[in-house]
Amino acid sequence: MAEPKPLTYDEQKAAEAAFVGAPSNPKWTEAAQLLYARLSATVQTRSKETIGTSTGSAIHDGNTTRR
């Protein structure tokens, strides 16, 4: 497996923004824009999955402990 390359400054900022839900910056490089788009979509999808499964199942089965 190839060694991963370090993120550029723009890519780091894009990743941080995606994780906290901040907007994209049009001044970022194309690579940073792509990183932001992919991370934002993944974070949003996982957030919906987590909310639907952990909260929903705790309510339905009466178990109030976190899973």
Image (spheres, rainbow, N blue to C red):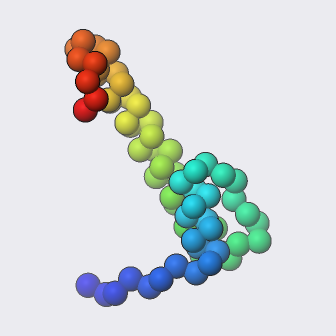
Q: Residue furthest front?
A: 65
Residue 16: x, y in percent? 57, 61
Look at 62% across and 68% down and name the residue there: 13
Q: Quadrant of residue 12?
A: bottom right
Residue 57 lies in quadrant: top left
The reply to whether residue 37 is in sight is no
Taking the image as shown, residue 40 lies to the left or right of residue 63, namely right
Vertical relation: 29 (above or below) 48: below
Instruction: Please state the total of marks drawn on the protein image.
Output: 0
Residue at screen point 47% across, 83% down: 6
Q: Nearer the viewer, residue 36 or 6?
A: 6
Farthest residue in the right direction?
27
Query: What quarter of the picture does the N terminus occupy?
Result: bottom left
State the residue at coordinates (41%, 31%).
Answer: 51
Image check: 35 left or right of 1? right
**38 lies left or right of 52:** right
Q: Nearer the viewer, residue 65 or 62?
A: 65
- On screen, residue 42 versus residue 64, left or right, reads right
Residue 61 at x, y percent in the picture? 22, 14
| Residue 49 seen in render | yes
Residue 25 drawn above or below residue 49 = below
Q: Position of residue 2 (x, y in %)?
A: 31, 87
Q: Residue at x 48, y 49 (%)?
A: 43
Looking at the rendering, in which quadrant would you find the C terminus? top left
